Amino acid sequence: MTPTHALSIRQPWASLIVQGAKDVENRTWAPRRRIPFRMYVHAALRRDGLSVPDQEWILDRLDPKQRHRYLDAVQPLGAIIGEVSVIGIARDTVNAESPWYESGIGWMLDDAIAYTEWPRVTGQLGLFKVPAWVREATWGKESDDGNQ
């Protein structure tokens, strides 16, 4: 199913999601869409200002293959960089066994696809409708195992 909406996420979190490494997106709000659904991942124009301990925290959660992909990855800004399925919601650590869940409402993610071409789109707050020209095109896609 082709997604119709996107969520704008700061880097490096957006790239970690489309690489299949990060399986929970922490938010303070739940989506109003029926779960499961597929969405585009939009890399925001601003990066998350991470300190060295924050970077180490990320690396500690990645297996060796994911760590290599993360460190070598180009992290574009202001573009749709892939898509992912939202398969559930976690509201506490009992429901979210993922090391990526922090607190609040965790969007549980699966079946990530990273694009090799990144259509530039202006992001918005919340889930936003993606222009038709993005939905109608086929962007270079790479599955979370690194295969095209």
Image: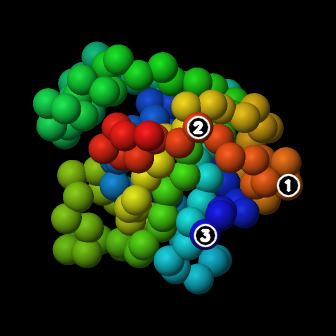
Residue 24, position as x, y percentages in the image: 37, 57
Q: Is the residue marked by circle 1 packed among few (<14), some (14-19), or many (20+) residues within 10 Å?
A: few
**Disc number for residue 1:** 3
**Disc nearer the start of the sequence (1/3):** 3
Q: Amino acid at mark 1?
A: Ala
- The answer to whether mark 3 and mark 2 are in CB contact below 8 A is no
Q: Secondary structure at mark 1?
A: helix
Circle 3: is it few (<14), some (14-19), or many (20+) Cα within 10 Å? few
Which image quadrant: the C terminus? top left
Residue 82: % across, % down: 55, 44
**Residue position for label 1:** 132
Q: Amino acid at mark 3?
A: Met
Q: Which mark is residue 140?
A: 2
- Type of amino acid under label 2: Gly
Earlier residue among tags 2 and 1: 1
Distance Cα–Cα, label 1 vs label 3: 15 Å
Of all residues, the one furthest to the front in this rendering is 148
Q: CA distance from mark 2 to mark 1?
A: 17 Å
Q: Is residue 60 above or below residue 27?
A: above
